[in-house]
Image (cartoon, grey):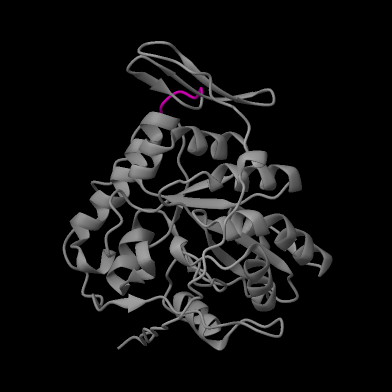
Amino acid sequence: MKKFISCIIAVIILCSCTVEYNTSEYRENEKMSAENNTAVTYIRGNTIYGETTGTTKTYTGLEPLDLQDFSNIEISPSGLSTTKICHSYGVAKNGKAHEISLESQKFFEANGYNAVTLDTSEQTKNIYLTFDVGYDNGYTEMILDTLKEKGVSAAFFCTVDEMKSNPEAIARMINEGHIVGNHTDNHPSMDELTRAEMIAEIKGFDDYIRTNFGYSSPYFRFPKGEYSEEALDVVGDMGYMSIFWSLAYADWDTENQKSAQYAHDTVISRIHPGAVILLHAVLADNAYALEEIIDTAESMGYVFESIENYRKCN
């Protein structure tokens, strides 16, 4: 019997005050107005990162990739546990990962799962910046601006709906060297699906990004951090690495923003060697705090590394 990770549910009460931001000074008028079949080109600097002409859409200038064939993936139950596991990571402090994160990483490695929540390489100060991208409200562009200015690469996990609703931002991520990771087609709890349904969710995302953006990456994030051993097995069989996290905070509620300073102080107080950081791109606090978070972390000797180099660092 394999060891299960306990599902720890934390209820965090947030301040009810609303923080107002003036975003106009951060936004450039990048979109040329167009009507009907007039082409619209999104430009930043010398980079053209999207174009729409009539009903034909090409966002990266890349040719569509061939679709992957996952027909060889076993759809019959494997016998592994289908019990829901809620990803737990604990609150790191004093420059050390929480024991829960360490145990999670040990669990993945001991059972041969291609998954990471923490870089446990000895004496590393590499940290990995990742974002979950939901409904966009203008802050993704600010985040991309900051990352470009600071020369930091990140991984963005999104669904098909987000690719459809904000294609210019997705194309920009790709063109500026970030990872766009698979967060499924419809954002379901994967442990509640059959193997065939899991495969369809992952393939739905991959088919769309290959067809519309000429891009794919082997990185997957479980919606809501909910999974099972069966689900981990499916993701691994499909050639993906499951990317969890060891540092996060309750930053998904746009109605309960506190301040950019709060976001900065919370992240920095929990930073630790090997941290996989999860932030949500929908929050103004994160967008406004990101530059200072990067500067402070680097002043402490941390190095922002791309998750694609995780294996090379171990």
Vertical comparison of 66 with 19: above or below: above
Residue at screen point 58% across, 66% down: 277
Judge whether residue 172 can be spotted in this image: yes
Residue 139 position in % (x across, y down): 55, 47
Residue at screen point 25% across, 75% down: 80
Residue 151 position in % (x across, y down): 74, 46
Main secondary structure along the magenta-highlighted residues = loop
The C terminus - image quarter? bottom right
Near-viewer residue (270 or 282): 282
Residue at screen point 46% across, 80% down: 13
Residue 41 position in % (x across, y down): 52, 19
Bounds of the magenta segment: 61-65
Image position of 5 (left or right of 188) = right
Would you identify the image quadrant in which residue 236 lies?
Answer: bottom left
Vertical comparison of 27 with 19: above or below: above
The N terminus - image quarter? bottom left
Vertical comparison of 198 with 142: above or below: below
Near-viewer residue (257 or 58): 257
Give the tally of numbered discs: 0
Residue 65 position in % (x across, y down): 41, 30
Image position of 117 (left or right of 272) = left
Near-viewer residue (186 or 21): 21
Would you identify the image quadrant in which residue 108 lies?
Answer: bottom left
Image position of 261 (left or right of 158) = right
Residue at screen point 21% across, 68% down: 192
Judge whether residue 74 can be spotted in this image: no
Would you identify the image quadrant in which residue 25 lies?
Answer: top right
Vertical comparison of 288 with 233: above or below: above
* Residue 205 included in the magenta stretch of the image: no
Image position of 261 (left or right of 13) = right
